[in-house]
Image (spheres, coloured by chain):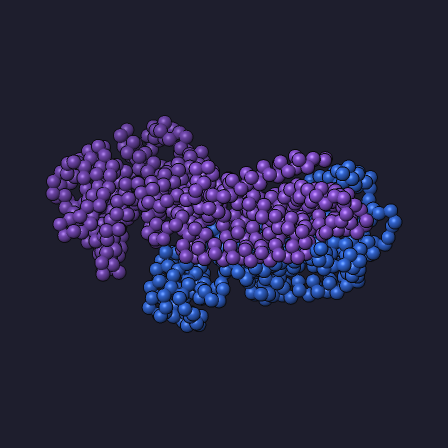
Amino acid sequence: MRISLTYRIIISALVIGLALLYALPTFLGKENPLQSVLPNKEVNLGLDLKGGMSLTLGVDMDKALSSSLGQMGENLRVQAKDEDIVIIRPRVVGNNLLRFYLLNADKAEQLEDIIERTYSKKLSVKNKESMGQDRTKYTLSMTSEHRDKLKEMTLDQALKVMRNRINEFGVSEPDIRKMKGNRIQVQLPGLENTGRAVELVKQTAHLEFKLVQEDVDPNKAAQGQSPPGTEVLYFSEQGPESKNPKPIVLKKQPLMTGQHIADANVAFNRYNQPYVSLTFDDRGARIFERVTGNHVNERMAIVLDNKVYSAPNIREKIRGGRASITGSFSDQEAHDLAIVLRAGSLPAPVNVLHERSVGPSLGQQSIQQGVTALVVGGLLVLIFAVVYYGIGGLIVDLLLAFNMLIIVAVLAGFGATLTLPGIAGIILLVGTAMDASVLIFERIREELRKGMSPSKAVDEAFVRSSLTIMDANVTTILAALILYQFGTGPIRGFAVTLTVGTFASMFTAIFVSRAFFEIWLKRKRPESSLNL
Amino acid sequence: MGLQLIKPDTKFDFMNKRKLAALLSGAVILLGLLGIVFQGGLKYGIDFAGGINVQVQFDKDIDVAELNSGLKGAGLPDLRAQRFGQSGKHQYLLRIPSGTQGPEEVRSTIQNRLSQVVDADYTIQRLEMVGPKVGEDLRNKAMQALFYAVLLISIYISGRFEQKWGIAGVMAGGLLAGVYVLQLIGLPVAFLALAALLITVGMCWYLRLNYALGAVTALVHDIVITVCILTLLGKDFELSTVAALLTIMGYSLNDTIVNFDRIRENLRSKTPRPLYEVINRSINQMLSRTLLTSGTTLLVVLSLVILGGGVIHNFALALLIGVLVGTYSSIYIAGSLLLGIGPTPESEDSEDSAGVTKSEA
């Protein structure tokens, strides 16, 4: 297919003009005189260049499933009780089975009816075993549909809660997304106080109000078994005696949870000590009023993530829906606690599976080193091309410059992320982009030596080399695509620049450079010689 | 007037040295494999092994032994410090295998300890923690990437290389079927990649796709030698190493494709010559291109190795070795192999595609 020189020049100019338009904002920076005319897009820097933290968190789905199963067991017990059916010891076995005992065997049908009615799509009776004395052991399992649904809901909720928390934390351009395998990826560019952010993100913030069991000695209970229906928890580690946290015995069943919190704020007492003041929503306020009214003169512990913060005595029914969490907090700790309570608790505990944090100094250093390597390597190649090919070398140099321009423009235009391996990819391309030109140039030389006229030689060289060039580059693009598919953040950046750059170099070498040659040939009439 | 490094009438007898080349490759591979066996497998970096890496920069030089002994009492018994990056930057990498402490705990432990024992200002520049699960995931992903690379590239070269897409289809079908069966048996991905390779080689042999066979052999040669040399240099095997290996695959094929294309072109010339001569002549014709391209690529990769800094060093080094080996193998390994087994027999098919090439004009 023969493309006329005019078209060739027009298309080349269009592409390069467009590339210039999109590449300029990156080179000039945000504040530039052409701001209003140019597209408002710059190359995005990856966390390894910008500095910041990337966290991959795994949501503990086993815990989420088993606690949901436990909740269902408890609900079932209450529901059965309403219909005079007694079931005891509902318990979660091995994360996915619910086991309990029915005491009045004659009501088995009625019980199964309840299960069918309320939990038809969620639970199924797996096994029923008569234990004598009218007892029947039931084993229920969660249906796989409900399990999948629950997992999805848990992940979505965890995502929402983390988003809320991070928004309040105040990081610019956070990126929080779901990943395969019950994971959540959190990227916080420019963040420096990583420890605080990790705490904020991974804290479950499960708040409970529980009654204190006064008639049991906590120290004894801590060593052995606590009475049924109670549990031993410890006061949150504070101050110098944190090595030996104090135990306390609480009723297992919470009076209330943090589900109904409308707001949480930092306040200061008269000693100027910070504490967190909670406001419940209407429903929460009613529940709080009722439970405090029912337990006047008992102690109520405020438990956050299984750590007891305080256990004050209820002096009277508390109206108005307010409560406070006190402890020896620093201002910042109180502030962060208020954030997590406001944003809500995570539906399940999360673990940090992967963390990478890069300080701004290293990011800056990486950019500097990468760019130095690029400039030095690039200059060497540019000089080499001119030394080796003379005027033709200038064409190679121009093509290389166009390649850079196109890469930057595409990265900026599509909002792709440039990482350190991405810069390495660009550097590598400076070397390999030469290849396409070299193939053509060497071929021209070869055809000239055979005694062909310059225009014929150029023609022949482009035709013969184009196929080889495309061929050779397809393999690179294949490799890059695979890398993109399987690589993680920084490596993906490499795959992106490699792909974009390879396409760019094919375009410039096969299409644009031919325009240069044809212009050159035209100016050299009569066809005397071609200095290559 | 431009320069010419390689005179047009250059006639190196490359194929004459093919036995020496085979000996050299064999020796390096043998040494490398011995090294790998000796250290009990590949030395995984943090990506694959899991653990915590902390990169610290001091404002002056610290003795590594001093740093190691200073950090000994920090409650991180397996911590190992080593120099990192360019020498003038006073950077150190502290490596901690998976342990009980979380990343942020480790950060504060190290900060506390460094403030006590080292009389220098420092910054923690980078901290990376890879949990065991993620490490395993990344190992799997890397293996899958290698596997798919082998698969796609095999299919591509048997098609485009041999210019027989029909046979490439058969090849692809056979390869996919073979791999599918193996997957059913439950073979791990590492073996799948190996099996895919073996099937490819076997089918190339059976279908007499000799160019493809030469290319695949050269490719495997490059990957294996690069891994061997990296091992002998005591470098860690990381995710970025795998990225470099995939890039090398592309690069190595690129070189081989260019040489083979010329061999094929010359074989079709009207005056038939012995294969030995044709291969030598083709390589000589392409020599200047081969050296130029490799030269410029080496130039830039070398500047990356020297100037690019510690974070990218392993990646750049793997590329450097790969480019060198790839250039050598496309001449000696791919060429010699082709000489040994002969070119793919020409059929009407390939006459066709030769016609296509010409009609492009």
Residue B260 in sight in this render: no
Q: Please tell me which residue is depicted at 56% across the width and 65% down the height of the picture.
A: B234
Q: Please tell me which residue is depicted at 20% across the width and 35% down the height of the picture.
A: A285
Choose top left, top right, bottom left or bottom right for residue B73.
Answer: bottom left
Choose top left, top right, bottom left or bottom right for residue A379.
Answer: bottom right
B291 vs A127, nearest the viewer: B291
Indicate the chain coloured blue by its letter. Answer: B
Residue A316 x %, y %: 11, 40
Residue A421 x %, y %: 52, 52
- Quadrant where the image shows the C terminus of chain B: top right
Choose top left, top right, bottom left or bottom right for residue B291.
Answer: bottom right
Residue A523 horizontal side relative to residue A156, left or right = right
Q: Please tell me which residue is depicted at 60% across the width and 44% down the height of the picture.
A: A504
A448 vs A477, nearest the viewer: A448
Q: Please tell me which residue is depicted at 40% across the width and 51% down the height of the picture.
A: A52
For the image shown, how many numbered marks are present on the structure?
0
A478 vs A185, nearest the viewer: A478
Indicate the chain coloured purple by its letter. Answer: A
